[in-house]
Every structure is written in structure tokens, then in C-alpha cells.
């Protein structure tokens, strides 16, 4: 008489908490999730196909728009891959490398601030959103002063940087860094010890280290599960090998640990920035581009290069046929796409209310997932 | 390094101190000055390098078409023809610009065209600090050569760099009064 | 029925009720603006400040919007229940204002009932019907789920709501709201001896009104949209009105039961009811102002909580209600009973003083010093 059957609910593409157009097909039994299948593709714009028709320098603004929250690291990944293909990685001047590191770390802080804002507001805490955006405004102002745009930066070029730093930029950066620790303390006072927050995040979405490696998860979800893997330490690029910072590792692999990892990453990024400022002041001004031709024609070959973007390992695979100015094939390995595959494993057995916490903790950006 | 889970003291658990800490933070924020800029009565002036609306200079342009080549979305339409003109008493073959149109509604303001321009100062530049480009008619956003040089109906900011050069002091300045 | 009796029993209470009702409506309308503005100011932004001086005309603009909006009625909804749904929570929320004394003396209360507390509790409990009807009549699976969840939440927090009052009853010995306030004027605010009960009452108040941290039925970032999804325009406004009205009722109750109502006295010294009544009209107004200030404080605390805390998941919410609040309330009753039987009620004041003192002591301690820039030590979180 009472037949218990599972219900299929659509956590539809239009939803305030999915951070973009993500559809999750939920199979629920009452309120327990049995299976959560993400359905993507609503934001597919054919970026990789576009790359085949544009010259390498023209691709850089398009890489901005994949992970639109952290565009400097997208630019960095592409530019480094092309440089690796051309074999000029060693010729990038020190000042350009330091500028790239500074912009990447600022972008990491900005991306994590946005993550904190949206994650907190999904779980119900409204105010961290506004406080983090206030700090994020300062970072975006720094970006605007350097390259002219706030979100889609287009701030790196193959072989170096487009412009040198404007006058007074480093002083503004230092002023920001000095206030930033107090700001993180403020967000933590609202959330980290809060028993309601802990109830919503401790034990939710546990991902064991073996599972995380099997699924190919990278970035804070991987480190939150206890695996010590950060590309900046494992395969250093730019001048990360000379900088002194630590990589936070989680203990249990639940949402709370991932939250703590990202908060600590923000502090470590701030530490990197404070080390970079005296280093860049010691380099000669104006030396920001390697001596390569304006027309970029890499030799024939293929290369894969990855960097640590705020969401995880962002990789570019470029195949060049040696003759044309555009890539024969450029494939992007987006971190959010691979991390999203772990969602069914993390969501099994939890309630539907936890699904929003889980989507927030993986930190997906649909522009990257769908390209 | 491992993240450290905070260890609550017994006082934290029974006296709900963690909740009160949060309440203390919000009350403190209540009395801080607010950073909201009341647009449109107050506007923030963008940075010197801000990539806004284009401006074009017909006199400086040498019709090399490098900007059209550099554009990732091919929205710069250039028509050039050769002419014999008298320069310094001699007949020289010069390129004359017939058409220089930009389809601004599809532009992503990446400034690759500005970077590619070889003239000093540049013939096309984006540092006009103008971002209020909305219009009611789609066709208003297709700018031809005259409009690109002489558009005048957007908000202007004082101290605009007329020529491309090294940016001077940067920093966000607040001006009251908006639209001039 | 003589003329005097008619005036005394019918006309005069009706007039008082209407005045109280109007004041309440004004306060409820103003609360809309206060909430949005205060929430904004806490969140490092300004609230609505465009419509009129500092946004005050928003209070006028919002009802105009609600009245002029298109009233969409789903075709497959159950019509009678659909129309009844928003009205049912409003009716008890308005009637209760007859029973609540707003100031000293008989002018400030419409109907002086000697079991007023019981009546108020009973009336506020009937507000659940409107939620269930509204959720069910929408003919929407998710509205139904949201409505039932909200109803379950409200019903299960009725129990600690009532149990926490028993401690107050034992100390004051009466169900009459006026006499409870008088008792507090002659001793001390019930907040101190019954601090645990005050806390439970406050938490249950929040849960009853579906306010953060218990606002899961209203949260739009969850899957189930809630019982008022299918309602538009004025019917939705009714639900909102009912919510603010019942917030106001609960704040008034909290003030009367735990904070001494309109009096500002300790051990019979100060502004007791007799003193205020003896001051005539000025005393009445002063008493009303004191009462109003205390009630507004609790309304502001509602908003403060909404700005600060994340929300509970539904099963955690029910957990909290049944497994923590009810045993705590029962424990409070036992402890209070012991003290009352021994005749040593005044000893209980030290419980309140000790708890509040400890909280203020810990909060005023300076936070951990700012971490140095390039630290290589393990992370220590500021707590």
C-alpha cells in the first residue's frame, strides 16, 4: 500500500545557490540524497574552438572569461604554457615574474573572498558577504590601477607583462596588506568558532584522501582531505621556489576543513605579497618583457603546463603545428570541472540542505566548468 | 602545515561566547563609516589606465590596420585606398583612410588594439575614463570615424590625459556632481 | 444594560483596542523600514535611502506596491483555503493586543483578564493553521513541504515557549500580566533569577517567528521555497504583516515577563506602577515610553540576530528544540521549584548576576594579539 519510491528533483539551472547555471539531478528518498548528478553545459561558449582561430596574443582576453572570478591566474596559465612551448621560460625577467606572482596572489585572495561571501550567504550568514566585498573592492581598485580593468584583466602577455607598475602602486598594495589580517580576523570571528556554522559544516561532504586522488580533485578540496599537494610547491613556476610560505592541509576532509584551508591560504597569500614587495623594489624598473618577436609563432610540438589557480590545478594543453599563428588545439583542464565530479560522492547520504553547502565548498565557477 | 581546529573552552560552550563574539563584530560594524558611493550623485573617478570608451585621432592614424588585426573579435572595420598626394613638393603614394568603424556594442574593451597601434602618441586609445555607454538604440553603438573622434555626450572627468603617456598619479578620487 | 455598563464593558475597551491596534500597525509598518535600514547599516552599506528623507517614504511605497501588484491565483489551488490562509495568522496576532498591557494603570489595557498569560499563549499558537492552510492550498509540492516544515517547527517550539514561562509563574504566583509586572517592580527583573528561562524563551520566540537562525522555511537559497511561494501582492503582505505582528507580540511578552514591563524599579524603589499612576497623565506616558523602549530593543535584537548568524538545518533545528530546549526548561522548573519551596527566591538572583557577569567579563577581554606577518608557527585562530 505504501510504496516508497525515490523522488527525482531538479535542482534547476536557475537557482540562487548554484553560482551559475548548474543543474543537479537529485534522487532523494524523503530528504536524504541518494544520488546527485550534475548536468552542465549551460554556459558553454566554445572557447577552445575559438582558440583555434585566434592568434596566441588574441586568446588572452578569452582566457579571462573562463574562470571570471580569478582571471589573472587564467592569463598566467595560458601565457606560461605558450612560453614553455616556445622555450623562453628562462628569459622572462625577474621583475615580470614578481609582477605575475603579485597579481596571482592578489587574485587568489580576491577569489577566496568571493568564495567566502557566497558560501556564507548560502548557509544563511548574510553579513560576511558585504564585509568581504569591501576588501575585494580594494583589490579590484589595485587591479584597475595596474591594467585598467577590474574583473577581466587581460594583464599578462606572452614573454612578460604589458606595462610597468604605476607610481605609488606598491604603496597602495602595502597599505592593503597591512589592513588585511585584521579583516580576516573579523570574518573568522563571525564564522570559525560559531556553533551554528560548525553544525552546518563539520562532517558534511567528507572526502577521503584516496577518493580525492581517484577523482582527480585538486586545490583546496584535495588539501582539505589531507593530501599535501600544491603545484606552487611541488612543481614551482615563476619565482615561487624562492618565496617562503606554507600550504595548509586539512585533517578530516569535511567542509569545515576546506573552509579553514582557504582562510589560511588567504593569510599565506598575504605573506607572499609582503615578501614580494621588497624583492620587486630591488629589480630595475621597466624590465618587463623578454626579447621575443611580436608575432608569436611557436615551433611544432605539444605541451601541457599547469598552475595553481585559486580553485585548483588549472592546466593548458597546447598543440602547435609550427607554421601558423594560432594553436592547432588548445585544451583547458579546468579545476572546477574535475572537482565537480566528486559532488555525487560527497553528497551521498546528506540532506538536500547540505547540497548548497557542498556546492559552495567545492567552489565552482560555471564559466570554467563549461568554457 | 595542518589547519588547527579551535578548541573551545568550557566557558565558550556554556556561556555561548562564540555567538556573542559574532554579535560584537556586527555591532562594531554598525558604527563604522560606510563606504557606499551614492551613484549617480557621487561617482568614483576611474584610474588613469582604466579601459573605457575609445577615442580616435584621424590626424595621427597612419592606416596600418594593425589594430584591426589585433582585435580578437574583429570589430574594427577599416577601408583604405592609395592616393597620390603632394607632400613637400613631391608626389607620394599615401594611404588614405576611408572608413574606420568600431562596433562598440560587441567590444570587450581588452585594449589589444591600443597596444598594437604603432604611432606615438597612439591614434586609438581607451583611457577616456568613460564607462557610461548605455543607450536606448542598438544602432547608437556603432561608431564611425567622425563619431569616434568627436563624441562628446558622455560624462567627462577633469584632468583627462589627452595624449597617451605615462600615467601620473593614480588612485581613486571621488568627485561630486556627476554629469557635466 | 445600563449606559455606564455598556460604556465600561463594550465601548471603552473597543476604543482602547482600536488605538492599540493602530499604534501596532504603525510600528509594524515602520519595522519594515527599520529592518532594512538596520540590516544595511550592519552590513557596511546603507539601506533604502532614496525614497524620501533617509528612505522613510519606503514605508508608504511598499504598501502601494503591494496593493497595485497583480494578484495571481494559481488555477489549481483550493480557493477557499487559499484565501483563508494568509488571514488566519493575522487574526490571533491582532486579538492578542487586547490582552497585553502597554503601560501603568487601567487605561493601557483593553481587557484585563486574570489568566491573560494562558490566553495569550493559546491565541498565538493558533497562528500555525494559516501556515498549514497556505502551504497546502497552493497545490504545490514544495510549498506543502515548506508549510509542513514550518508548522512542525512552530509547534515543536511551543513546548519550550510554554515551559520556560512556568518558572516565571512560580516566582510571581500569578498568570495576570499586570501583576507579573508589579511583582518585578517590587523585586527585580525576572531576567536575573530566570536567566535560563529568558534565554529559552528568546530562542523559542525566534523559532516561532521563523527568524534567523531558524528561518529555513523562508530561506530562498534552499530547495523548498516555502509556504508563501504562490502568494503575491496583498496576500503575501498579509503573511509578512502577520510575521511582524507576532514578532511584536512576542517582544511585548518578553518585556512583560522578564524585563519588568513599564516599570524601572528595584525592590519597590523607583518607578513602580503605583508611582507612575500617581503621576497622572505624565506617569502614564512615561510608563508607555519605557515599555516601548524595551520592546523596541527586542525588535532590534531580532534584526541583529538575523544579520549575524547562519541558519540551522531543519533536523538540527528540531534537535535543538526537543533535545536541548525542553530538558533545559524542565531543569529550570525543578531548580526554581526547589528555591521557591525553600522560600529563598532571592538567592536565584545570583545565578543571573553570575552568568551575565561572566559573559561580560569574557567578552571584554582583549582578543588574541595580531599574528606577525611571516609566521612559521602552527595556525592559532582568534577566538
Image (cartoon, coloured by chain):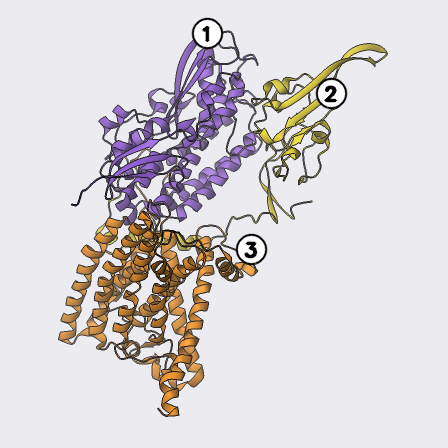
Which residue is denoted by mark 2 in the rendering? B98
Q: Left or right? Give the position of B109 relative to A36.
A: right
Residue at 31% in and 68% down: C254
Name the tint of chain A in the rendering. purple
Closer-to-camera residue (C268/B106): B106
Image coordinates for residue A107, horizontal then vertical, percent = 45, 32
State the SS at label 3. Answer: loop
The chain ID associated with circle 2 is B
* Chain painted orange: C
In the rendered view, tell whether residue A282 sits above or below residue A18.
Answer: above
From the top left corner, tell me how far across and down residue C40 is, in percent. 46, 53
Q: What residue is at 71 percent from the left and 22 percent from the top?
A: B99
Counting every numbered tag in the picture gives 3
Indicate the quadrant where residue A182 lies: top left
Q: Which chain is yellow?
A: B
Query: Relative to residue C63, is residue A68 depicted above or below?
Result: above
Quadrant (top left, top right, bottom left, bottom right) of the N terminus of chain A: top left
In the image, taking residue A61 as reference, residue A211 lies left or right, namely: left
Foreground disc of the pair 2, 1:
2
Circles 2 and 3 on the same chain:
no
Question: Are marks 2 and 1 in one subunit?
Answer: no
Mark 3, Cα crowd under 10 Å, few <14 / some 14-19 / many 20+, is few
Q: Nearer the viewer, mark 2 or mark 3?
A: 2
Which chain contains the residue that carries disc 3? C
- Report which residue position mark 3 lands on: C50
Residue in view at x 51 percent, y 58 percent: C68
Quarter-wise, where is residue B24 in the image?
bottom left
Q: Which mark is residue B127?
A: none
Secondary structure category for the residue under label 1: loop
* Residue under numbered circle 1: A300
- Where does the image place residue B83, in percent across and percent down from the top left? 78, 13
Amino acid at each position: 500500500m505504501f510504496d516508497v519510491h525515490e523522488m527525482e528533483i531538479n535542482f534547476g539551472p536557475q537557482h540562487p545557490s548554484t553560482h551559475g547555471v548548474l543543474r543537479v539531478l537529485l534522487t532523494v528518498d524523503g530528504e536524504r540524497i541518494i544520488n546527485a548528478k550534475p548536468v552542465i553545459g549551460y554556459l558553454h561558449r566554445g572557447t577552445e574552438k575559438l582558440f583555434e582561430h585566434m592568434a596566441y596574443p588574441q586568446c588572452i582576453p578569452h582566457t579571462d572569461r573562463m574562470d571570471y572570478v580569478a582571471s589573472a591566474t587564467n592569463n598566467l596559465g595560458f601565457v606560461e604554457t605558450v612560453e614553455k612551448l616556445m622555450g623562453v621560460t628562462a628569459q622572462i625577467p625577474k621583475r615580470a615574474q614578481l609582477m605575475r606572482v603579485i597579481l596571482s596572489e592578489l587574485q587568489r585572495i580576491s577569489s577566496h573572498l568571493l568564495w567566502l561571501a557566497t558560501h556564507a550567504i548560502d548557509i544563511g550568514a548574510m553579513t560576511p558577504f558585504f564585509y568581504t566585498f569591501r576588501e575585494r573592492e580594494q583589490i579590484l581598485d589595485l587591479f584597475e590601477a595596474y591594467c585598467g580593468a577590474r574583473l577581466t584583466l587581460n594583464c599578462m602577455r606572452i614573454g612578460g607583462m604589458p606595462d610597468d607598475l604605476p607610481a605609488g602602486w606598491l604603496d597602495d598594495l602595502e597599505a592593503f596588506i597591512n589592513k588585511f589580517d585584521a579583516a580576516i580576523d573579523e570574518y573568522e570571528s563571525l564564522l570559525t568558532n560559531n556553533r551554528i556554522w560548525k553544525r552546518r559544516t563539520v562532517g558534511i561532504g567528507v572526502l577521503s584522501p584516496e577518493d580525492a586522488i581517484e577523482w582527480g580533485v585538486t586545490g583546496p578540496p584535495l588539501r582539505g582531505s589531507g593530501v599535501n599537494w600544491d603545484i606552487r610547491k611541488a612543481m614551482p613556476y615563476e619565482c615561487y621556489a624562492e618565496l617562503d610560505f606554507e600550504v595548509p592541509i586539512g585533517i578530516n576532509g569535511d567542509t569545515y576543513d576546506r573552509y579553514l584551508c582557504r582562510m589560511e591560504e588567504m593569510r599565506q597569500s598575504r605573506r607572499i605579497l609582503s615578501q614580494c614587495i621588497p624583492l620587486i623594489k630591488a629589480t630595475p624598473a621597466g624590465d618587463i618583457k623578454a626579447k621575443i618577436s611580436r608575432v608569436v609563432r611557436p615551433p611544432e610540438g605539444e605541451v601541457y603546463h599547469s598552475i595553481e589557480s585559486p580553485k585548483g590545478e588549472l592546466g593548458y594543453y597546447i598543440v602547435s603545428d609550427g607554421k601558423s599563428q594560432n594553436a592547432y588545439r588548445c585544451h583547458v583542464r579546468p579545476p572546477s570541472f574535475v572537482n565537480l565530479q566528486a559532488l555525487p560522492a560527497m553528497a551521498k547520504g546528506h540532506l538536500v540542505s547540505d547540497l548548497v553547502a557542498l556546492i559552495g565548498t567545492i567552489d565552482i565557477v560555471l564559466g570554467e566548468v563549461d568554457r | 602545515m595542518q589547519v588547527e581546529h579551535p578548541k573551545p573552552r568550557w566557558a565558550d560552550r556554556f556561556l555561548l561566547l562564540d555567538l556573542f563574539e559574532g554579535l560584537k563584530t556586527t555591532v562594531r560594524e554598525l558604527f563604522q563609516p560606510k563606504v557606499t558611493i551614492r551613484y549617480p550623485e557621487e561617482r568614483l573617478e576611474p584610474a588613469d589606465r582604466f579601459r573605457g570608451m575609445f577615442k580616435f585621432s584621424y590626424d595621427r592614424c597612419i592606416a596600418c590596420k594593425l589594430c584591426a588585426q589585433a582585435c580578437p573579435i574583429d570589430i574594427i572595420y577599416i577601408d583604405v585606398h592609395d592616393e597620390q598626394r603632394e607632400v613637400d613638393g613631391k608626389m607620394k603614394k599615401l594611404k588614405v583612410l576611408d572608413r574606420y568603424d568600431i562596433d562598440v556594442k560587441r567590444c570587450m574593451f581588452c585594449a589589444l588594439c591600443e597596444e598594437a597601434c604603432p604611432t606615438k602618441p597612439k591614434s586609438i586609445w581607451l583611457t577616456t575614463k568613460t564607462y557610461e555607454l548605455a543607450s536606448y538604440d542598438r544602432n547608437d553603438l556603432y561608431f564611425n570615424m567622425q563619431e569616434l573622434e568627436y563624441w562628446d555626450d558622455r560624462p567627462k572627468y577633469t584632468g583627462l590625459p589627452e595624449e597617451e603617456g605615462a600615467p601620473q598619479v593614480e588612485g581613486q578620487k571621488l568627485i561630486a556632481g556627476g554629469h557635466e | 444594560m445600563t449606559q455606564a455598563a455598556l460604556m465600561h464593558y463594550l465601548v471603552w475597551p473597543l476604543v482602547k483596542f482600536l488605538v492599540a491596534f493602530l499604534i501596532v500597525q504603525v510600528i509594524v509598518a515602520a519595522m519594515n523600514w527599520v529592518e532594512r535600514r538596520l540590516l544595511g547599516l550592519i552590513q557596511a552599506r546603507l539601506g533604502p535611502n532614496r525614497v524620501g528623507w533617509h528612505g522613510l517614504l519606503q514605508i508608504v511605497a511598499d504598501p502601494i506596491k503591494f496593493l497595485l501588484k497583480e494578484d495571481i491565483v494559481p488555477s489549481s489551488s483550493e480557493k477557499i483555503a487559499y484565501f483563508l490562509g494568509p488571514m488566519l495568522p493575522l487574526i490571533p496576532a491582532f486579538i492578542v493586543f487586547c490582552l497585553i498591557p502597554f503601560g501603568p494603570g487601567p487605561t493601557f489595557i483593553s481587557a484585563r483578564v486574570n489568566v491573560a498569560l494562558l490566553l495569550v499563549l493559546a491565541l498565538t499558537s493558533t497562528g500555525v493553521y494559516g501556515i498549514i492552510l497556505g502551504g497546502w492550498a497552493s497545490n504545490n509540492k514544495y510549498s506543502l513541504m515548506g508549510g509542513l516544515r514550518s508548522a512542525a517547527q512552530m509547534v515543536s517550539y511551543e513546548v519550550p515557549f510554554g515551559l520556560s514561562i512556568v518558572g516565571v509563574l512560580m516566582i510571581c504566583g500569578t498568570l495576570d500580566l499586570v501583576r507579573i509586572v508589579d511583582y518585578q517592580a517590587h523585586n527585580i527583573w525576572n531576567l536575573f533569577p530566570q536567566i535560563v528561562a529568558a534565554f529559552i524563551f528568546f530562542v523559542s520566540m525566534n523559532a516561532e517567528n521563523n527568524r534567523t537562525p531558524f528561518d529555513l522555511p523562508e530561506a530562498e537559497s534552499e530547495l523548498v521555497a516555502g509556504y508563501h511561494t504562490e502568494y503575491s501582492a496583498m496576500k503575501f503582505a498579509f503573511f509578512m504583516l502577520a510575521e511582524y505582528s507576532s514578532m511584536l507580540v512576542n517582544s511585548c511578552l518578553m518585556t512583560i515577563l522578564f524585563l519588568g514591563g513599564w516599570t524601572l524599579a528595584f525592590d519597590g524603589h523607583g518607578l513602580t506602577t503605583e508611582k507612575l499612576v500617581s503621576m497622572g497623565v505624565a506617569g502614564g506616558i512615561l510608563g508607555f515610553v519605557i515599555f516601548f523602549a524595551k520592546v523596541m530593543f527586542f525588535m532590534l535584537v531580532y534584526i541583529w540576530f538575523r544579520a549575524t548568524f547562519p541558519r540551522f538545518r531543519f533536523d538540527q533545528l528540531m534537535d535543538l528544540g526537543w533535545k536541548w530546549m525542553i530538558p533545559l526548561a524542565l531543569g529550570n522548573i525543578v531548580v526554581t521549584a526547589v528555591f521557591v519551596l525553600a522560600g529563598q527566591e532571592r538567592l536565584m538572583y545570583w545565578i543571573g548576576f553570575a552568568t551575565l557577569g561572566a559573559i561580560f567579563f569574557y567578552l571584554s577581554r582583549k582578543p588574541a594579539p595580531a599574528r606577525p606577518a611571516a609566521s612559521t608557527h602552527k595556525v592559532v585562530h582568534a577566538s
